[in-house]
Amino acid sequence: MTRKLLFGPDITEQHREIDVEQWAEVYVVGDIHGCADTLLELLERFDDGDCLFVFVGDLVRKGPDSKRVVDIVRNRENLLSVRGNNEQKLIDGSKTLPELSEGDLAYIESMPLVLSWDGSLVVHGGIDHRKPLVEHTTDELLHNRSLVPDGSYERPYWFEARDSGRTVFFGHTVLSYPFETPWAVGLDTGCVYGGQLTAYRCSTGEFVAVDPPTTYVERSDDSIVEPQPTVVN
């Protein structure tokens, strides 16, 4: 019997299912953007050696030490990440990070677009619930935010409107605080912009966070979303 594809063929090749049974705890972690010291603080506080950490992408760029972040995630078997739009920029050559080795870049190119387990999906940008998963493109998974065509910071946002289906963990949209409904969990709280590095403890539904030592990049208030945990019809 042919297995029905969750995504289209191109995305299926970049979709990785995780066996979480071997881990005592699973954390999903927001955008890091080269903030290696903050990542290490999170791991020192919450990684007891039996935890899986899944990142929503954008490990690199903007912050002070993308190379060290890649090294940390690449070399620990309990750390996994989907590809973010900033990784994609390195892959397509629109941005460069000279400090990254060929091995680092090969690792980044190997990062999946989707990680999943049980009823959970992890992507960088988001899912448009108005159409089947199989119709989603790479660009949508990396960049989805607003449901308004070309309306990046216009409501309705996909995550506020989503009201059924799998729980989608996401980053990309910088939030003033974490977002959670049964169908979407937003974790980019602007670590590189002076916010926090936020993680979601899956067993308890608890958000945990660490503060960066400084603000590395300034960001305008109109590109930081104050989420509204209401369903938009």
Image (cartoon, rainbow, N blue to C red):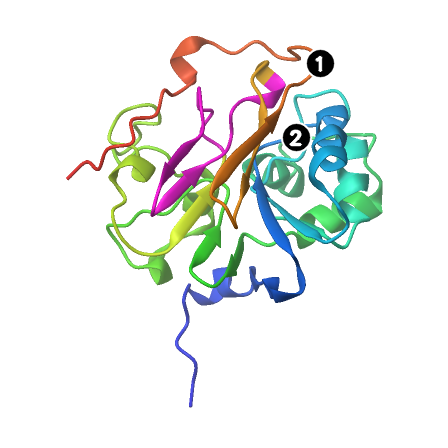
Q: Residues within 10 Å of mark 1 (few under 14, many from 20)?
A: few
Drawn side of residue 212 relative to residue 122, left or right:
right
Q: Quadrant of the N terminus?
A: bottom left
Residue at horizontal 63%, vertical 39%?
Answer: 87
Residue at horizontal 83%, vertical 30%?
Answer: 99
Closer-to-camera residue (183/143): 183
The residue tagged 2 is: 95
Mark 2–mark 1 contact, CB under 8 Å? no
The residue tagged 1 is: 213
Residue at horizontal 59%, vertical 54%?
Answer: 112
Is 175 covered by the magenta stretch?
A: yes
- Mark 1 lies on a secondary structure that is loop
- Mark 2 lies on a secondary structure that is loop
Q: How many marks?
A: 2
Pick whichever of labels 2 and 1 is earlier in the sequence: 2
Please tell me whether the stretch drawn in magenta is mainly helix, strand or loop.
loop
Is 114 covered by the magenta stretch?
A: no
Residue 154's place in the image compared with 30, above or below, is: above
- What is the number of the mark on residue 101? none
Residues in magenta? 172-192
The x, y position of residue 148, in whole percent, is 25, 32
